Amino acid sequence: MIPRHLKPTLEDRLRQFPAVALLGPRQSGKTTLALELAEERGDKAIYLDLENPADRRRLDDPVAYLRAQRGRLVILDEIHRIPEIFAVLRSEIDARRRGGEKAGQFLILGSAALDLLRQSSESLAGRISFLELMPFQPQEVLPIAGADAADKLWLRGGFPSSFLADSDHESNLWRAAFIRSYLERDIPQFGVRVPAETIERFWTMLAHTQGGLFNAQRLAQSLGVGWHAVSHYLGLLVDLLLVRRLSPWTANIGKRLVKSPKIYLRDSGLLHSLLNLPTLNDVLGHPVAGVSWEGFAIEAVIAAAPDGTKPYFYRSAAGHEIDLVLELSASRRWAFEFKKSLAPSVEKGFHVGCADIEAERKMLVYPGRDSYPGAGGVEIVTLLDAIAAAGNADAKASKP
């Protein structure tokens, strides 16, 4: 069992809120974590898998069933199967509050952010907190498996069944089946009426443009559809937590700034499968290697950042660029550059960008094993050290 770093935060939220929604793509470990919590609580928790007809039948009369569970944590997995239950949850939460039960009443698991956020925020405003559980991150795996597992995690991605497979071949087979399942089963389940082949082609196109600016018109021409359709496809994959749409940092600084978002597939293993790169040598020999590792590292750093942190990238019309900007508050920003090189260096454009955004801290992240000070106030740091720094970024004073 690889401990999930989100578990203490999840337990804290359950002590603070009546309901907590745990979001994440399928197979990312949500159910495993929820069952672990249920086991620790014993008869004070009950788990319902709403894809199981027997569990769904328990909620034929949801008012009566949930009333009978008062005093217990009720875990509802794949809640999108019965979205009408949100109104019942609101009523039950309010009834429990009147009875003195303030927090830790419901844990909701979901795979699609958009519908779950919309439905739950409308019905449970002020009663629910949201957390995101993505596949394994380096900060969870490497302290246990060792630094040598970094390339394995990068190649296979963090989905537990993929990372823990007996071989790269079996891992690649699992990811191919996972992609096919999403295309043929999961996406249609959310009411999307787009041919699986179209979404697969679009997903693969995004893989080929990993880390690039989103150009809806160009992608639309390649797919033979309108640009509105392409924007819809992108929104779908973002809502399913499979793609990150990284927004540009913008401010009135007297410079022309890029306004299109950058697109990253959030799991490096899925990226490599879509590009048919089953081994580490295949990845290292492909032009995507650098931006693949960049996306892998960006996800890990963002996952470690404090609540309320806003991630951006920075690019001016003159070409000055920062791979990742973490806006910790309105007046605090950290700048990150990512290099898949053991002898990394930053370009002038990074320094100019840092001056433009008034970066409090500047880091060049690389896949080495030692961190050291660089020129111009830039810290050369390992990925784990960058993750640790981001995790402590809410300290009032941050010093290199």
Image (spheres, rainbow, N blue to C red):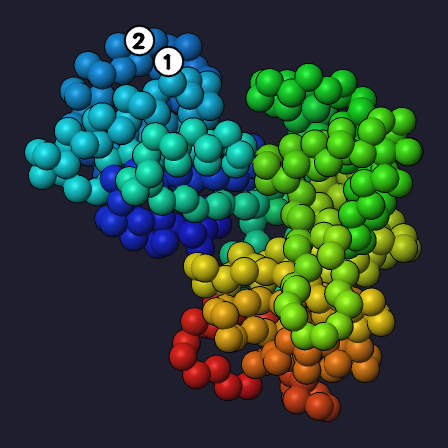
Task: Report whether residue 297 is seen.
Answer: no
The answer to whether marks 2 and 1 mark residues whose Cβ atoms lie closer than 8 Å is yes
Q: Where is residue 266 in the image (x, y as percent from the top left)?
A: 66, 47
Near mark 1 (Cα within 10 A), the count class, few <14, some 14-19 or many ≥20, is some
Nearer to us of marks 2 and 1 is 2
Coordinates of residue 337 in the picture (x, y in percent):
71, 71
Residue 90 seen anywhere in this rendered image of the structure: yes
Q: How far apart are marks 2 and 1 (CA)?
A: 7 Å
Residue that badge 2 annotates: 60
Q: What element carries label 2?
A: loop
Location of residue 62 (image quadrant): top left
Q: Quadrant of residue 347?
A: bottom right
In the visual, does 59 lie left or right of 137?
Answer: left
Which quarter of the figure has residue 91? Answer: top left
Label 1: element kind = helix
The amino acid sitting under disc 1 is Arg
Residue type marked 2: Asp
Left or right: where does residue 7 sit relative to residue 172? left
Q: Quadrant of the C terminus?
A: bottom right
x, y percent for residue 77: 41, 27
Q: Residue at x 54, y 45 (%)?
A: 134
The residue carrying mark 1 is 56
| Residue drawn 75% across the image and 72% down it | 255
Name which residue lies at 59% across and 60% down: 311
> Residue extending furthest left?
99
